[in-house]
Image (cartoon, grey):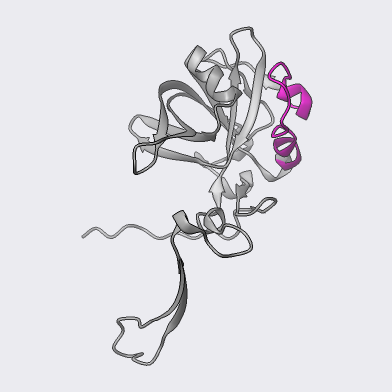
């Protein structure tokens, strides 16, 4: 069911101001040309994940559902739609690395998303250099501005409200090693703007850059 309605903001100085809203229930369809969910929850930092199969084959793949979930200790995670090679490798070895996807590496990142057989090394496919890990046996992308070595905490298969298992797998890892290209350290701070991270921004081919940055400190009380 879709519904258009008028919303009256609770602001005494603008009693006549209204905004038009479009509402739908995901279970019954969005009624739009394309599903807007990924465009609304955007931009999203890319989970560019490297892993190693038990036979030694390297894997590198980008995931648009990625995030950081804790800082002490640091924990990150990504979710795979389907039990893909990354999840299989990580479950088997207990290790993975997140690599920062930057604007200069956009084409290589996109190339690593190709649906190729599991025996294909995406580092080689994308023309990237595998740099050896320090605390894990999984390499990181040498050209990337930063990389996070992780040990697996758990792989969680997602379920719907009615308890039905989904073909979606959330991999959570604790960061055990951090690589930073020193070119992006300015006065001891990682220069996010200079690193030019790219993010997924909605539909099939939409990406975003970091754009303008600003500071806003949290209130003390």
Q: What is the x, y in percent for residue 215?
A: 45, 59
Q: Is residue 144 visible?
A: yes
Does 156 appear in magenta?
no
Position above or below: 164 against 21: above
Residue found farthest to the left: 221
- Image: 36 above or below 124: below
Total residue callouts:
0
Would residue 117 be found to the left or right of residue 211 on screen? right
Q: Quadrant of residue 11?
A: bottom left
Name the spot of residue 218 as percent of width and height, x first: 32, 57
Q: What is the residue that sits farthest to the top in this orientation?
A: 55
Which residue is at the front of the view, 160 or 106? 160
Q: Is residue 135 visible?
A: no
Q: Quadrant of residue 12?
A: bottom left
Q: Position of residue 25 (x, y in %)?
A: 43, 60
Depth check, front residue: 78 or 138: 78
| Residue at x-position 70% and y-position 36% | 109
Q: Residue at x 62, y 35 (%)?
A: 62
**Range shown magenta:** 106-128
Position of 32 relative to 159 (above/below) = below
């Amino acid at each position: 069911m879709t519904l258009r309605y008028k919303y009256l903001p609770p602001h005494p100085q603008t009693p006549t101001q209204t905004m038009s809203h479009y509402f739908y229930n995901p279970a019954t369809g969005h009624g739009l040309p394309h599903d807007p969910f990924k465009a609304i929850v955007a931009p999203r930092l890319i989970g560019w994940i490297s892993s190693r199969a038990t036979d030694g084959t390297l894997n590198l793949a980008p995931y648009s559902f990625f995030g950081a979930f804790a800082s002490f200790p640091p924990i990150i995670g990504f979710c795979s739609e389907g039990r893909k090679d990354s999840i299989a490798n990580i479950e088997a070895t207990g290790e993975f690395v997140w690599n920062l996807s930057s604007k200069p590496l956009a084409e290589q990142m996109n190339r690593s998303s190709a649906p190729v057989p599991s025996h294909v090394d995406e580092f080689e496919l994308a023309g990237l250099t595998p740099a050896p890990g320090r605390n894990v046996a999984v390499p990181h992308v040498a050209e990337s501005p930063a990389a996070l070595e992780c040990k697996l905490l758990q792989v969680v298969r997602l379920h719907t409200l009615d308890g039905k298992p989904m073909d979606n797998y959330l991999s959570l890892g604790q960061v055990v090693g951090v690589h930073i290209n020193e070119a992006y350290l300015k006065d001891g701070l990682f220069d996010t703007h200079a690193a030019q991270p790219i993010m997924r921004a909605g539909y099939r081919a939409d990406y975003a850059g970091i754009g303008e940055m600003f500071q806003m400190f949290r209130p003390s009380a």
